[in-house]
Image (tube, rainbow, N blue to C red):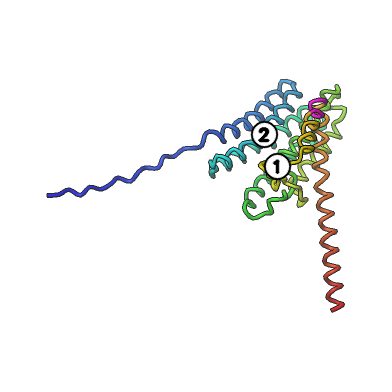
Amino acid sequence: MTEELTEKPKLRRRGIYLLPNLFTTATLFGGFYAILAAMSGRFEAAAIAIFIAMIADGLDGRVARMTNTQTDFGAEYDSLADMVAFGLAPALVMYMWALSGLGKFGWLAAFVYTAGTALRLARFNTQVGIADKRYFQGLASPASAAILAGAIWVGVEHDLAGQDVAWVASFITLASGLLMVSNVRYSSFKEIDFRDKIPFIVLVAVMLGFAVILWQPSLVLFLIFLGYAVSGPILTLTQLKQRRAERSEGSADGDDG
């Protein structure tokens, strides 16, 4: 009597990829540490922690794509980490530094920013694979967090008390939160291929850029991301004007025909 040998199906091991999720964890820790530092009155350290979280957030996706370790778990974990690092942390740090003296309006401004981050991340997740990759719809949450962190860092370095600039801080917080949920388009810079060859002068410009940032990191970083926030409305208005001009030319051609 012969026995039929049947191969047992191989069980697929369930797990997560370590490398990209380490960077995501670093993003989460940066936001967590920023809140702890602000609770201790160390606002400069809190702002720097948010910027470090931005660097880690920028690396996790690139590492996942380079190593072909993209997963649904990683995408969800990244969104949750972003909510803490770029939603809760900047809002709470700004509230403790400047907005607490404004009473209800202060916590309302902080909440609008936090809610804007949550809505921005939810909209981004639902538009993956649909939206034009060249542009972001609304200000990206890391850039928005950089504006708040940069403003706090500049204030601390120039010995400005948060209560003295509370109304300016509230305007920055509200504007950053509302820009995240707006329909304003921002360049994503995803069309840039870092593997392509570049002219030598570009490398020199990058080196000079690093030198300027190291010379006055708080002010330069704040101005860079503030400029990026302003570039969105300019880009959107420019594209609207171009579309209207094209429609006008099209209608004129139709009338001539």
Which residue position holds label 2?
85
Few, some or many residues within 10 Å of mark 2 (<14, 14–19, 20+) = many
Q: Is residue 67 magenta?
A: no
Q: Secondary structure at mark 2?
A: helix
- Residue 251, x across and y down, in percent: 84, 72
Q: Residue furthest front?
A: 200
Vertical arrangement, residue 257 with respect to residue 207, above or below? below
Apparent side of residue 246 relative to residue 33 in the rendered image (left or right): right
- Residue 50, x across and y down, in percent: 71, 30
Which residue range is magenta in the image?
Answer: 211-215
Select label 2 or label 1 by which is in front: 1
Query: Residue drawn at (58%, 42%), measured in percent from left and top?
Result: 65
**Disc 2/disc 1 C-alpha distance (Å):** 34 Å
- Residue 126, x across and y down, in percent: 63, 51
Which residue position holds label 1?
197
Q: Disc 1 residue type?
A: Lys
Q: Quadrant of residue 150?
A: top right
Chain-order first, disc 2 or disc 1: 2
Taking depth in this image into account, of 214 and 31 the one nearest to the observer is 214
Q: Residue furthest left?
A: 1
